[in-house]
Image (spheres, helix red, strand yellow):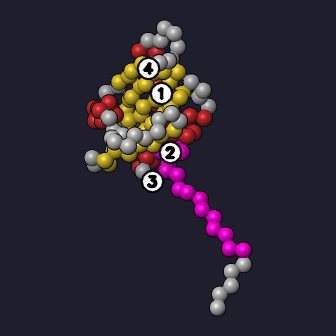
Amino acid sequence: MTYFADATVVYIPKIPAAQQMVNGIIEGRPKLLGLQIYTQTGTIFRVFWRVSFPPKSASPAATPNCLAIQDGTVSLGFDHGTVLVTMPLHDRNGEYIAAMRVKLKSFLGETQDNAVTRARMVQKDLEQLCTSADNLRD
């Protein structure tokens, strides 16, 4: 015979390190509308995201994200008062370990150089937090 007195279950979900980094970077930046990090293990891409970028069901690894990881291509696009910038994340040796996509509020007269410069500030913060590909794994 077994008796249970006030049994409770405490569940604390495990949040991946990359998701914690994304959440931390977004906190103090009002002009940063969204941030995604794409990692690649073999041919599988994984997405960590925050705000206004829900993962798409079909293929989260679009061509700009693949190119950013493979050869460091920076791409950007403007859309209704926002700008999307995709660029690679480097490890401490300068190798490409992931891609990041930021969605920023645009301003009147913003150029491509301005958008990339603002995205580079986010890139530098992420690279300081993530010095190797192991930091992005669960």
Q: Position of residue 19 (x, y in %)?
A: 50, 45
- Residue at position x 27%, y 46% in the image: 43
The main secondary structure of the magenta stretch is: loop
Residue placed under numbered mark 4 in the picture = 79
Observer-nearest of 81 and 29: 81
Nearer-N-terminus badge (1/2): 2
Q: Amino acid at mark 3?
A: Asp
Per the rendering, the mark at residue 103 is: 1
Q: Position of residue 134 (x, y in %)?
A: 41, 49
Left or right: 27 with respect to 3?
Answer: left
| Disc 4/disc 1 C-alpha distance (Å) | 10 Å
Residue that extends furthest to the bottom in the rendered view of this protein: 1
The answer to whether marks 4 and 1 mark residues whose Cβ atoms lie closer than 8 Å is no
Label 2 sits on a secondary structure element that is helix
Q: Mark 4 or mark 2, which is nearer to you?
A: 4
Left or right: 23 with respect to 84?
Answer: right
The answer to whether marks 1 and 3 mark residues whose Cβ atoms lie closer than 8 Å is no
Q: Amino acid at mark 1?
A: Lys
Residue placed under numbered mark 2 in the picture = 19
Nearer-N-terminus badge (2/3): 2
Q: Is residue 6 visible?
A: yes
Locate the N terminus and report the quarter of the image it occupies.
bottom right
Q: Which residues fall within the magenta stretch?
A: 6-21
Q: Amino acid at mark 2?
A: Gln
Residue placed under numbered mark 3 in the picture = 138
Left or right: 13 with respect to 44?
Answer: right
